[in-house]
Amino acid sequence: MKSKLFDLTGQVALVTGASRGLGQYLSRALAHAGADLILTSRRKEDLFPFIAEIGVLGRKAVPLSLDVRDQFSIEAMVNAATKVAPQIHILVNNAGCNIRKPALDVSWDDWNLILDTNLRGTFFVAQAIARNMVQHGYGRIINIGSVTSVAGYAGLGPYGASRGGTRQLTMSLADDWGPYGITVNCLAPGWFETAQNRVMYQNKEWVDYLVDRIPLKRPGEPHDLDGAIVFLASESSRYITGQTLLVDGGISTGATRATVAPAKQVHQS
């Protein structure tokens, strides 16, 4: 029997960017906890295989098209979503993108693409869904951030700016919408292999370097996020808002491998 604190039965969760990667892992965790799903992607057709998989779990799943960089696309998606489910209980703002380049090579268009998707898109999707949540006096908004929300990495300037902005935005929205029974938190994964960064994980030297910096000595695995997403989406987190939950194996501690010199012996006479 599920604990009521973590039971999402009867609730509807809307997950953006669910055609691949972490969006699908987060969606699976919510479905296993009992939630029905509304899933979005820029191409609705890309969601069809995953929709069938969720159906096997005994949960309902509806695919919708969404380009978070397009105001009219956001409005159309929300109108369609609320026709399917008059109340949206949970929003997982997962849609995102990245372009890895040295800072000197970042173009104007690179910056706009990343910030428009990861930050502006996150805000306006949250705003549109929050209007529904306000009407019902309840909501759980989970903005997907990153360890780059709290730490800087070379080659990730615009991405880090967008994820740091997501963290700050989360705190502001929590203050705005708390009186309406809506919590807003940021789930910040560390280094997880996804389609966007798979090429990096093919470099053994880089992976070894990464693992040296992670106290738990391994990159993240998809199911490492299951407990965190269900926690933030459920009744168990009802008094938690405006927070950033890092699921990063401890890399944000700044740990590095160090050669420790032998301790000097102290002789007492």
Image (tube, rainbow, N blue to C red):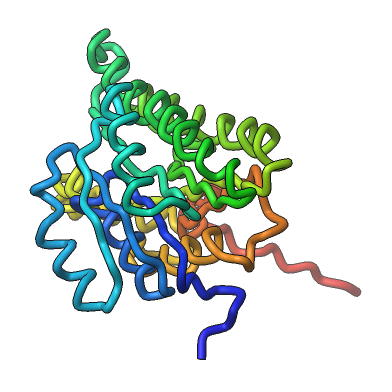
Can residue 132 be seen by looking at this rendering?
Answer: yes
**Above or below: residue 19 compared with residue 131:** below
Total number of numbered labels? 0
Q: Quadrant of the C terminus?
A: bottom right
Viewer-proximal residue, 263 or 113? 113
Q: 58 above or below 61?
A: below
Q: Residue at x 81, y 71 (%)?
A: 267
Query: Where is 57 relative to 261, above or below?
Result: below
Rendered residue at 27%/34% (across/down): 97
Viewer-nearest residue: 227 or 137: 137
* 105 or 182, nearer to the observer: 182
Q: Nearer the viewer, residue 209 or 11?
A: 11
Position of residue 1 relative to residue 153, above or below, is below
Q: Quadrant of residue 196?
A: top left
Residue 73 in which image quadrant = top left
- Answer with left or right where residue 242 lies relative to residue 29: right
Query: In the figure, is residue 115 to the left or right of 148?
Result: left
The image quadrant of residue 114 is top left
Q: Is residue 111 left or right of residue 5?
A: left
Task: Indicate the position of residue 82 as horizontal and vertical percent values.
Answer: 38, 46
Q: Position of residue 207 (x, y in %)?
A: 26, 54
x then y, percent, for residue 227:
48, 69
Residue 210 % position (x, y): 34, 51
| Identity of the residue furthest to the bottom in this view | 1
Residue at position x 37%, y 28% in the image: 121
Is residue 105 among what the camera can see? no
